Every structure is written in C-alpha cells, then in structure tokens.
Amino acid sequence: MEDGLKIGIIGTGAVGGYYGALLVKSGFDVHFLLRSDFDHVRQSGLRIESKNGDFNLDPVNCYFRAQEMPECDIIIVALKTIQNNQLRDILPVITTSGSIVVLLQNGLGVEKEITDIVPQTTVMGGLCFLCSNKIGPGHIRHLDYGSIRLGQYQDDTFAVGITDELKKIADIFSKSDIPVQLEASLGKARWEKLVWNMAFNGTTVILDATTDMIMNNVAARSMVGEIMAEVIHGARVCGYAIDDGFVDLMLSATEKMVEYRPSMKLDYDAKRPLETECIYWRPIRTVTEKGHDMPKSRILASQLDFLDWRNRECINNVNQKDNLKI
Amino acid sequence: MEDGLKIGIIGTGAVGGYYGALLVKSGFDVHFLLRSDFDHVRQSGLRIESKNGDFNLDPVNCYFRAQEMPECDIIIVALKTIQNNQLRDILPVITTSGSIVVLLQNGLGVEKEITDIVPQTTVMGGLCFLCSNKIGPGHIRHLDYGSIRLGQYQDDTFAVGITDELKKIADIFSKSDIPVQLEASLGKARWEKLVWNMAFNGTTVILDATTDMIMNNVAARSMVGEIMAEVIHGARVCGYAIDDGFVDLMLSATEKMVEYRPSMKLDYDAKRPLETECIYWRPIRTVTEKGHDMPKSRILASQLDFLDWRNRECINNVNQKDNLKI
C-alpha cells in the first residue's frame, strides 16, 4: 500500500460505509466521520454483509468531528446531497492543496459546490451502481453490483479527459475490489445516470412501485421511456450528445434487474428527505436557463415535493370528510 | 306537470339517483333502470339524505332490463363513462325520434357516442357541480351543491346556442329544484370543466390527497396551476377561447371548498375503474391530432393507468425484496 496515504470517508452509510470498509480491508489507512452511528462504531466497529463474503472491521478510525480527523489525501463524500451544507465546515479542515475529493452522489451541480468550498483540491464525481442498504448502526448489507463510473470535474469543461489523478483513484479502488470505469466527460456520465434516475427514482416513489412493476405495465413503461427521452433532450441542450437508442438500452437493462427500489424510494420509505433538488430541479433549471422546458420532469418533481412534505409529517391532521362529484 | 311526459334514468347512483329522486319528488313520471340495486330498490325504494331535507321514495318505477321500460321523452344518462358500452343495448329500445338524451358525464367525446347509437334523438351534455355519494343500495347522501351546466350537442358545431329543447329541460329541472345554467357552447363548457378535472381528479388520486392538501402545498398548488394552463392551451387549439385568468379563478374557487375528494378519487378509493379515457386520453388525443402536445396531462394519465391497473388487483404478488442504490 502507498505509504502514508490517508483516505477520509464523509458519510458512513450504505455507500460510504461499504466502499470505505473495502478500502480498509485491502490495507488502506481510512478515517471515517460519523454522526448518529459514532458511539456504536467506536465500540463495535463496522459489519459488512455481502454476497462477496461477510466481514467485520474492529476497531476502525472513527471521528465525531472533522476537527479531530487527520488531513486526508483522498476524501470520499457519500452523504446524501441534502446534507451537503455540512461540507462547508468539514472539507476545509481535512483537505490540503493536493487533496482529491471524490463525490459519490447523484444529481447535478454537486461538484460546483465543492470547488466553491475547497477550490485548491481536485474534484471528481463518481456514479455508483450499487445495491446496498444500511440495516443498523455500522451495519451494511451489500446485495449486488458495486461499480463506479468516475470522472474529473473542471468548471465549464465538457470533457476533462482521463487524468493521472483519475488513474490514481482507479488504481486504489481496483486494489480494493471496487470496479471502476473512468469517464473522459463527467458531465455526460452524470446526464446518462440522470436518464435512468429521473425516470425511475421519482416514479417508484410516486406510484409506490418497484422497477419490475413499472416495467410490467404498458402505460408506466411507456411513460418512463418518455421521461428518459425528455432527459436525453435536456442533455443535448446542455451539450452532451446521448443517442436516442439509450432509452431502449436503459429499459432493457432495467428489465433484467429483479424488483428494485431506487435510492429515492428507500429514502421515502424510511421517511428521509428526498434528493429532489439535485436529481430533478437542478437539471430542470439548467435546461430552462437554456430556453428549453422539461414539462414531464417538472410534474414528477412537483409531485415529489408534495409527497416529501407530507411524508415528513408537515400535515398532522388530515381529514377526508367530504366528497364532491366534480 | 306535463301530461304523459316520461323520464328515464340510466344509472341510479350518486348522480342519477339524486337528480331522479328530485324529479319524482316534484311530480314527474320517472323510470329508473337499475342493476346491482334493483332488488333493494324494488322492495324498499330510494332514500335520499340531503342538506335540503331527507326523504324516501317508495315505491319507485324500477326496471332491471331496458326492454321492460316505457319509451321515454327524456333520458338522463348518469352512468360512469366506462360503462357507456351498455348504452348500445339500452338507448335504442327506450328512445323515439323526439327523445332528448341528457348525458350527465365528465370528459370529452361522450355525446358523439350517443348520436352514433340513436342519431334521431336530441343529445345534450350536462356538467354537474354536485357533492353526493351513494352510501348503500338505493341510499344516496347529498352533501352540497347540485347545479348543472347544460348545453346541446351537434356534430362539428362549436356553439349550438340556447335551443327550445334546452329551455324545456331547464324548465323541468328548475321545477325540481335543480339549478341549471344553459350554455350556448357545450364544447366550451366541457373544456372549462376539464380545466379543473384534469388538474384535480388525477392529482388527488396520484398523491392520495384531498383538494385542500394540494392547495396548502406550494409545489402541488403550482403544479395544478400549470396543468390547468396546459388544458386551457389545449382548449384553444380546439377552438375554444378560455382566458388565462381562468386558472386563478379555479384555484380561488377550490380554495373556498373544504377538503374534497373528486369523483375519480372516490372511484379509486372504492376500487372502481377510473374514467381516465374520457377525462384524460380523449382530450390529449384531440389536441395531439391538431399537432400540439399535452405532456403534463400525459404523465398524469399514464400514472393513473398504472394505479388503476394495480388498484383492481392485476398484480397479486407484489414483493419488495431488494434495494438498489442507483
């Protein structure tokens, strides 16, 4: 292992906990920032259940405050995007000018936030194709998949290319059995992920359905195809050429999956806030600013905002007394 | 009362049962066609609970088969539109060339179906602003409102005007304490009703919400406003000029209502099939044929088709086993 290389994990949940544990297991020096699970993990470590084999890590380097952490060469951010406001306090104290920040988050515009906070670092975005769940404090169940599409961010640059920094991270991840695909254009990779996410994340929440139920219904399947086409049009408006055939590719891939609940559906079912801002509103606003509309996505985003609001019990007394034939 | 005038009621539910009972009460000769409630109503009559006073009608002229009914001068059709296929067997045997058929149904394209079946009759459409519910066999609870906007239909004619036949029906209804507003253009009246229905009927089903919950949430309220604007645009494409200000008018009117479940929400909650075809797909197709799109309405209609499909238990074994972070 590389001498003295320190890796920080911000957000030790289903994503950060899983990848962080794999890095520890293969010998890297990993430092976990925790909030709610801090006491449990300090006392009992991390427990990973995986189809690739279960394992425990005890002790692990864990911290309750960023100020107690060492400066890190690589910082993996795996918070939900709705928690990104915390990064303003965390990142400046654990990064140096040589640090690489790897954002394992969905949606649009997240890298920009990071470069605003720590402009001297290298920022990357990673799109995870991972099926895992935190089932208890420090206890993660990995069900399937696990690859990451990784690209480097640079303001206003469509395609940074495959840089040495990207290769360095890919090397570290590969040594830890984390499959990585490097992307010359992070923006395009993000939009390609949005094609699936904007179609299925919202729809599974709104229709209270798993992906297979949607695929098995003619109307719903056709609808997610229409939404995908709208996102592809949005991507083109933003300069990323995604082929129309990508819709069928995504639908076929989804067909091969068993019944899945996407991350937004898991969040909704657990009554956690939804990532509607980064996964829907930012792409919609970006496209709107360029003079185009995403009417279908707007409907989904508005419905999600309503459901999110009610899900977190902003309405306490719902009475359904009267009935109107109208 | 007019000598020998016979009125037939097709569909003795919350709408047809209520209006039919008012007509009986004021002395008209009314004949009810019933299916599921036939035995009950033949033995015990109709029971109306209303804010305007409760009353029973026993006996009432009721029939299980159209063939047993007399020919009627006025036929009030108050079936759900999804049952309109029954009219092909019913209408020819109870109408004459002088009959007036009054359709008390939502949506688009329903009059055309009737003129195809009984082209020799006069066909009218009535839009009910009625808050009532069938709460048991032959047992109707009227909660509020009750007025009807009534217009005459003639193929390909934008505005037939206020005809003598319309005045005749208005006179009969008025004598029975049913407020009627006559419409020179049935098409425009239907589109104006669609502005509210396409926004709220679907949304209350999809979001499992009453109208007041939607009005109290910024995102949902803004969304129904957007859908209304889309329907108004659709109406214009079809030649009916509805002012943009109609959106605010409808929103204000909805704000003054207490928490309501529109008819589609009542149908959904009772696991009855939804009137998505007439209330959504026909307007959407009509506008599409004229070269314009209704993308927001399409999303709602597709979501409704999925929910309707699942609601009527086409899916028997729903398992939600796996979770994918995607």
Image (cartoon, coloured by chain):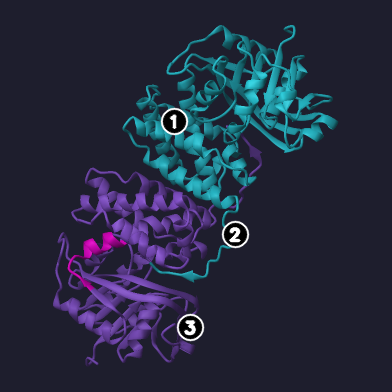
Chain colours: A cyan, B purple
* Secondary structure under the numbered disc 1 in the rendered image: helix
The crowd level at tag 1 (other Cα within 10 Å; few <14, some 14-19, many 20+) is few
Q: Quadrant of the N terminus of chain B?
A: bottom left
Q: Is residue A150 left or right of residue A245?
A: right
Q: Residue at x 43, y 64 (%)?
A: B262
Q: Quadrant of residue A126?
A: top right
Q: Looking at the picture, do discs 2 and 1 lie on one chain? A: yes
Residue where numbered disc 3 is placed: B39
The crowd level at tag 3 (other Cα within 10 Å; few <14, some 14-19, many 20+) is some
Q: Nearer the viewer, mark 2 or mark 1?
A: 2
Q: Which chain is indicated by disc 2?
A: A
Residue where numbered disc 2 is placed: A316
Q: Which residues are magenta?
A: B182-193
Q: Residue at x 32, y 57 (%)?
A: B248
Indicate which disc, 2 or 1, sits on the residue closer to the N terminus: 1
Q: Which chain is indicated by disc 1?
A: A
Q: Quadrant of the C terminus of chain B?
A: top right
Q: Position of residue A39 (x, y in %)?
A: 81, 34
Q: Residue at x 77, y 33 (%)?
A: A38
Q: Which chain is indicated by disc 3?
A: B
Q: Is residue A228 left or right of residue A39?
A: left
* Secondary structure under the numbered disc 2 in the rendered image: loop
Q: Nearer the viewer, residue A224 or A81?
A: A81
Q: Is residue A138 above or below residue A19?
A: below
Residue where numbered disc 1 is placed: A248
